[in-house]
Image: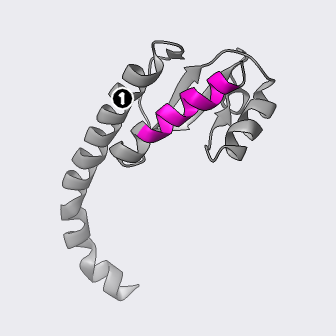
């Protein structure tokens, strides 16, 4: 308790820089998702946070699609976990480092296309 309480002013002073870096990463990654995925799929409008939604062709049921992507080493949540009624929606994180994120977007596109 006491060491953390004593360090709190310094920790809070770091917050603005951390928030700015995180916001920039989210902005860059969302732009990457649109560039890599929007040609074939639809990246939905992002209302903030660090998750984005993308609509992909419906080759499999949402749970099966998420499982197939997991088998390919990709983590995606089916849209119904976010109360979406539209099938084929996936929820993905915007938090990875930009280079890792871009590779993941390309792998996602290839994995979904392979299901066709």
- Which residue does the image show at 33% across and 26% down from the upper left? 31
SS at circle 1: helix
Q: Residue 112 occupies which quadrant of the picture?
A: top right
The residue lying toward the viewer, choosing from 14 and 73, is 73
Q: Is residue 110 in the magenta section?
A: yes
Q: Which residues are magenta?
A: 103-114
Residue 110, x across and y down, in percent? 57, 29
Residue 106, x across and y down, in percent? 48, 32
Q: Is residue 98 above or below residue 44?
A: below
Q: Which residue is mark 1?
A: 32
The residue lying toward the viewer, choosing from 71 and 44, is 71
Other residues around mark 1 within 10 Å, as few (<14) / some (14–19) / many (≥20) = some
User: From the image, which quarter does the C terminus lie in?
Assistant: top right
Q: Is residue 35 in the magenta section?
A: no
The residue lying toward the viewer, choosing from 68 and 80, is 68
Q: Is residue 4 above or below residue 40?
A: below
């Amino acid at each position: 308790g006491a060491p953390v309480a004593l360090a709190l002013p310094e920790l809070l002073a770091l917050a603005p820089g951390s928030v700015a870096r995180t916001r920039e990463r989210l902005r860059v990654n969302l732009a990457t998702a649109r560039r890599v995925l929007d040609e074939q799929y639809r990246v939905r409008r992002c209302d903030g946070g660090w998750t984005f939604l993308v609509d992909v062709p419906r080759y499999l049921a949402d749970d099966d699609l998420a499982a197939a992507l997991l088998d390919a080493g990709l983590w995606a949540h089916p849209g119904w976990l976010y109360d979406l009624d539209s099938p084929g929606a996936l929820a993905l994180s915007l938090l990875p480092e930009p280079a890792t994120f871009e590779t993941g977007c390309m792998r996602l596109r290839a994995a979904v296309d392979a299901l066709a």
